[in-house]
Image (cartoon, rainbow, N blue to C red):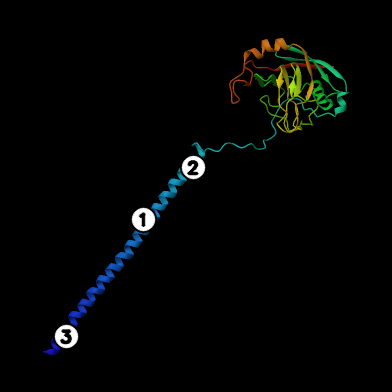
Amino acid sequence: MAASKNQEREAREARERLKRYNARQSVHDNQISRRKRDNIIALLAAGVVITLAATAQIFFFTSGPGMPVAEPSESPEPESDKVVVDVPSPEYSEGREWTGEITLNEVELGITLDGAAAPQGVAAFVAQIQADYFLGTTCHRLVVSDSAGLIQCGSFDDVGGGDPDFTFGPVENAPADDIYPVGTIALARVGNDGFSQGHQFFIVFQEAYLPSDEAGGYTILGTVTSGLDALESDIVSGGIVPGDRGSEDGAPVIPTTITSATIQ
């Protein structure tokens, strides 16, 4: 009888141990299952966040306010049907005064150039006139402000671009006081680069104050001796096309082309 009770007690204890084991195993299995589920959810959430972030970044840098601004880069040499001119030596100016005429649309401007004061600049300008380079080029820029009135012409691509194969320097015959009198003919250039002078020049029809930079001022070639009144009435009076540089600096409303140029 005693043996039977002991067996029952042992069987009961065995069942209890099995129940506790099963309970612990169930808890353990649930914990493992929950961790797996949590990990999957975390991975899915991370994937969603990454996808949203990537999408937002793509939008921001392609069509949103963070769209990259095109940086200046070296451009291929522009195509042009203009006459090819080599930069002549300063001696080509002969150190003398040259006279001639430049016609903008139908406005005839008498000019004189000082080969003694700006031998390199005048040599280049004379060579271009003699080669008919300027014929058909445009005057792409007009400035009318309290501090300056000028028209700029001779661009290689007719909209302000330069010719990489026609540059020279340094600056010659620039005024010490940065004042360019009415009638001045001077060479345009890139800021702070005295060796970026080339085809482009400007004519001052209203006294201009143009501050010097690291390269100095602007090479004065000579003066306009006649025709400035007609320039102002027939071209400047039309005004300026509104643009990025405001209402005082831009293309002339009246399209302007160099129709004739002579020198002797």
Q: In this image, 157 relative to 121: left or right? A: left
3D distance between C-alphas at marks 3 and 2: 75 Å
- Amino acid at circle 3: Gln
| Residue at the (29%, 65%) spot, across then down | 30
The first of marks 3 and 2 along the sequence is 3
Circle 3 residues within 10 Å: few <14, some 14–19, many ≥20:
few
Q: Residue at x 45, y 44 (%)?
A: 55
Q: Quadrant of residue 231?
A: top right
Q: What is the secondary structure assignment of the residue under circle 2?
A: helix
Q: CA distance from mark 2 to mark 1?
A: 26 Å
Element assignment for label 3: helix
Label 1: element kind: helix
Which amino acid type is marked by label 2?
A: Ile
**Number of disc labels:** 3
Label ID, residue 41: 1
Q: Quadrant of residue 192?
A: top right
> Looking at the rendered structure, which numbered label has been put on residue 58?
2
Q: Amino acid at mark 1?
A: Ile
Q: Is there any visible trace of residue 106 in the rendered image?
A: no
Alpha carbon distance from label 3 to label 1: 50 Å
Q: Position of residue 146 (x, y in %)?
A: 65, 18
Q: Residues within 10 Å of mark 1 (few under 14, many from 20)?
A: few
